Image (cartoon, rainbow, N blue to C red):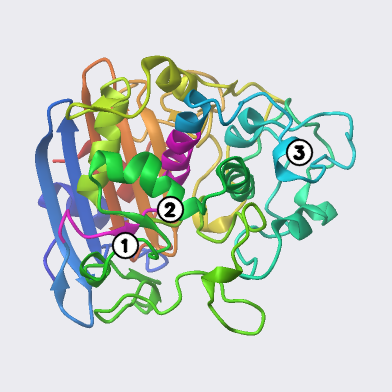
Amino acid sequence: MPRLPTCLLATLLVIASNSTYAAEPVASVRVAFDRAGITTTRVDGLADIAAGRKVSADDPVRIASISKLVTAIGVMRLVEDGKLDLDADVSDLLGWRLRHPTYPDRPITLRLLLSHRAGLTDAAGYYAVPLDGQLQDVLDDPRAWDAAHAPGGYFRYANLNYPLVAAIMEKATGQRFDKLMDALVLHPLGIAACFNWERCDDAVATRAVVLYDAQRAPVRDDHRGRKPACSVNPARNGDCDLSRWRPGANGALFSPQGGLRISANGLAKIGRLLLGDGRVDGVRVLTGASLRTLTQPAWTYAPGTGMTVEEDDSSQSQRGFYCRYGLAVQTLATRRDGCRDDPFGDGIARIGHAGAAYGLLSGLWVDRKAGTGVAYFVTGMPDAAPGEHSAFRAIEEAMARGP
């Protein structure tokens, strides 16, 4: 397998003697960029071990929670079009009453869902709703709600927020979430990407980056050169007939919280959109005002105001990871006791999002003042070593800083 760049390998060798942690990823891709385009690219390792296929910056990977940021860009386009209102009661669109059972008089809004302040948890699940199931059934489970905190007053990172966001988008437009995101964001930007593979063509799917566990066994996207026969959770009888889809019934179907398949180069274009105040390569996707709404922190950590770590173990985050959060946009380097949210280690308040799932760790971070950014991912690291100076993992610190 190709070796990591010397600077990254040196960082990881510090912890290699501890067999609990995988010392080297299966694949690593890092793309640096500025407002004008990509400035440097570093790729190492394999996209597919069995095929011996080397990874490239154009290969699509399940980018995990950075998907939330892209979903939020789609939401803001619908807000600009007057089809969604960030501060309206979402029950009106869903067609059923969405309320915290302990605080039934508190309306839940898109702004609260996007910023993880709606009082939801992942304890009842969020992604395994079958094709013929209903997301509402998950919300009827008391475990889906944080009994101790009312909507609006507490940050608790929960993936369940985003299937609800997708359901609301579908109800507002009558369009399937994956098709909607293609029309609103991916196609206008010329990015060959998709949520859960259905909208990607065979040529893109053939280049899928396989995700691996600690034993290097494939856990996601081992296509063997083909597009998957079923890209969603099948119906309870096992079929995958997408004609069963109904607007808003199952917002989890195309994994808005983590299922975006996108290349590092495609992710860099999203980063350049953030640098360009909603415009990139002559294409305006958002107004500057909408971009400011996305990126302005809706929550900043103070004792008693929220949790600074994701509860899902697959995130690999530690206390102090989340300290400022907008509408699916993290802000790094919060200078406050209890915050360790600076994988770069230089105190610069970059914006973007991290991702972690199925052995992948990823990041998209931009320094708007300097006009620069970086997109990266590594695979095969479900048990990565803790970082030296932040709540991120050591490999994330190394990828953030770069060569």
In the image, taking residue 393 as reference, residue 122 lies left or right, namely: right
Whole-Å distance between the Cαs marked 2 and 3?
A: 23 Å
Mark 2, residue position: 179
In which quadrant will I find the N terminus? Answer: bottom left
Q: Assess whether mark 1 and mark 2 are in contact (beta carbons under 8 angstroms).
A: no
- Looking at the picture, tell me which residue is in the foreground, 294 or 42: 294
Mark 3, residue position: 91
Q: Is residue 138 above or below residue 365?
A: below
Q: Residue at x 56, y 31 (%)?
A: 83
In the image, taking residue 204 as reference, residue 295 lies left or right, namely: right
Residue 103 lies in quadrant: top right
Q: Which residues are magenta?
A: 56-75
Residue 132 appears anywhere in the view: yes
Q: Residue at x 24, y 79 (%)?
A: 225
Whole-Å distance between the Cαs marked 3 and 1?
A: 32 Å
Mark 1, residue position: 200
Residue 374 lies in quadrant: top left
Q: Amino acid at mark 1?
A: Cys
x and y percentages locating residue 20 in the rendered image: 42, 66
Q: Is residue 13 above or below residue 231?
A: above
